[in-house]
Amino acid sequence: MTVIAIDGTFASGKGTLAKRLSAHYGLAHLDTGKLYRAVAKIILDKGLDPGSADDCAAAALNITPDILSDPALKSGPVGAAASKVAIHSQVREALLKYQRDFAARGAVLDGRDIGTVICPDADVKLYVDAEPAERAKRRHEELVSYGEDISYETVLEQLKERDFRDANREIAPLRPAQDAHLIDTTNLSIERAFDAAVQVIDAVLAAKTAK
């Protein structure tokens, strides 16, 4: 079964791209970031500390399909807490089996450690990125559309802080896998990003088939 691993920075467009690719190739899709946001929401709803590894690990074992479809997972506070939750090794261990079992059926997974940790043997690996200013612009527009009152400058500052945490955490830091193909979406529409990704994926799969 084909496994496509998509990693990348926050608000780079990797989630939208992953959904388009899953539909194109007829594969299931898992936004692994939602797992961490679900843990964060459980923690916030209970008034607990995202810095508590034990509490976060316990929350990770209580994720249900219902919470993964909760629109509140896209909110700013939940997103910020998710980045803090994700640094705990206990949380990552609790979610590892879930992600690998999902991938075993053939899937497109997007996140921050798919090609490096979750599915190191994925058939195709992509790394999606964009300039911070452009990503902050996209995220600000998204949050405003949800009715949140937040400035672009605040979003940019939070995004840079999140980038730093993701890239410098001790467990599974965000970085491209050695064999990942980079797609920079700074100046790309979703259509052009999708076309670029399909070109890469088709070429890699064709080369594997030819061996």
Image: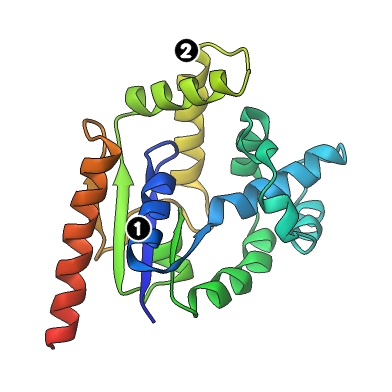
In the depicted structure, whether residue 157 falls above or below residue 43: above
Where does the image place residue 18, in percent across and percent down from the top left? 40, 54
Q: Nearer the viewer, mark 1 or mark 2?
A: 1
Is disc 1 surrounded by few (<14), some (14 to 19) or many (20+) residues within 10 Å? Answer: many
Is disc 2 surrounded by few (<14), some (14 to 19) or many (20+) residues within 10 Å? Answer: few
Tell me the number on the disc at residue 50: none
Where does the image place residue 42, in percent across and percent down from the top left? 79, 46
Location of residue 92 by image quarter: bottom right
Location of residue 50 by image quarter: top right
The residue lying at 33 percent from left, 25 percent from top is 134
In the depicted structure, whether residue 132 falls above or below residue 103: above
The residue lying at 12 percent from left, 86 percent from top is 210
Q: Quadrant of the N terminus?
A: bottom left
In the displayed structure image, the side of residue 192 where residue 1 appears, left or right: right
Q: Given the image, on which type of amino acid does mark 1 rest?
A: Leu
The residue lying at 79 percent from left, 55 percent from top is 59
Q: Is residue 9 visible?
A: yes
In the depicted structure, whether residue 67 falls above or below residue 187: below
In the displayed structure image, the side of residue 48 where residue 86 appears, left or right: left
Where does the image place residue 193, in percent across and percent down from the top left? 24, 44
Q: Given the image, on which type of amino acid does mark 2 rest?
A: Glu
Nearer-the-camera pick, 49 or 26: 26
Q: Which residue is mark 2?
A: 153
Nearer-the-camera pick, 147 or 114: 147
Lower position in the chain sequence, tag 1 or tag 2: 1
In the displayed structure image, the side of residue 38 where residue 187 appears, left or right: left
Q: Spatial distance from mark 1 to mark 2, Cα to Cα?
A: 32 Å
Where does the image place residue 207, in percent across and percent down from the top left? 13, 78
Q: Which residue is mark 1?
A: 21
Q: Is residue 86 visible?
A: no
